[in-house]
Image: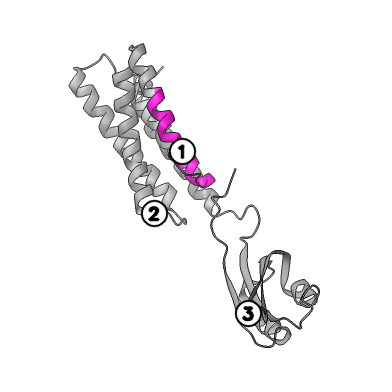
Amino acid sequence: MPITFESILGTNTMVNVYLICLGVSLLCGVLSAFAAAFRSHATKSFLVCLILLPMIVTTVIMMVNGNVGTGVAVMGAFSLVRFRSVPGKARDIAAIFLTMTAGLACAAGYVVIAVLFTLLVGVVMVVLSFIPMGEQRTLDLTITVPETLHFHNAFADVFEKHTSSCRLVRTKTTNMGSLYKLSYQVRLKDRGNVQGFIDDLRVRNGNLEISLAEAEDNGEDL
C-alpha cells in the first residue's frame, strides 16, 4: 500500500499528529460546505456546522480511542443531540454524514483518504445538482371564491390546462362566511406562464384574491 494511504498515527509526536488531523479535518469541512452550498439554499449556521463538525468528530474519536467508558459516555451524549435536532433535508443529511466520515478518517490518521473522499463526494454532489431528477417542486395555491360558487369542479379545466398535478388540501370560510379560501398543492406544466394561469383563475373566482407561492419546505423527508 502506498505510504500516502497509511495512517499517520504513531509516526510523529502526539501534538503534531493531532494538529495535522485537525487541519485536514478543517479542510474537509470547508470542501464539504462548498459542495453543500452549491446551487442550494443553505443557511450560514448550517455551513458553519459542516465546517466545524469534522474537527469536533476528529477530536472526540481521538480522545475516545481505547477508552470504553469514555466511548459509552460519548454515545449517550450523541443520542441526546439526536433528539434535540429537527429533521433535515435529504441533501443536508448526506452532507452531515460526509463531514462525519471525513472526521472519522482523520481521527484514524488516514488524512489522504479523508481529503480524497471529501473531494470525490463533493464533486459528485456538484455534478448531480446539474442533473434534473425527481419531481418538480410543489407550489401552494390559495384561491378566494364567493360562497355562491360551487368550487368542486369550477377550476377543473384550468388545472388540466396549466398543471401536471393538483390537490385540494384545505378549505375554510372567511369574511363572516361570505367567502371560501381554497388551498391547493399544484405543479405547473410551464412556470413561465404563471400570469396566464392566474388570469384564467381570476375569471372563475370573480377577480378575488389569489396567492401562488413556493411550498413550505417540509424537510424533503427520506
Q: Which residue is mark 1?
A: 120
| Mark with earlier residue (1, 3) | 1
In the rendered image, the residue lying farthest to the front is 176
Amino acid type of disc 3?
Met
Of labels 1 and 2, earlier in sequence is: 2
For numbered disc 2, what is the local secondary structure? loop
Q: Which residue is mark 3?
A: 176
Disc 1 versus disc 2: nearer the observer: 2
Q: CA–CA distance between discs 3 and 2? A: 41 Å
Residue 14 horizontal side relative to residue 192, left or right: left
Label pair 1/2, CB-CB below 8 angstroms: no
Vertical order, 129 against 67 (above or below): below
Residue 43 image offset from top left, x and y in percent: 39, 54
As for residue 100 lying within the magenta part, the answer is: no
Residue of label 2: 43
Dominant secondary structure, magenta: helix
Q: Looking at numbered disc 2 in the image, what kind of residue is underneath it?
A: Thr
Residue 213 image offset from top left, x and y in percent: 56, 70
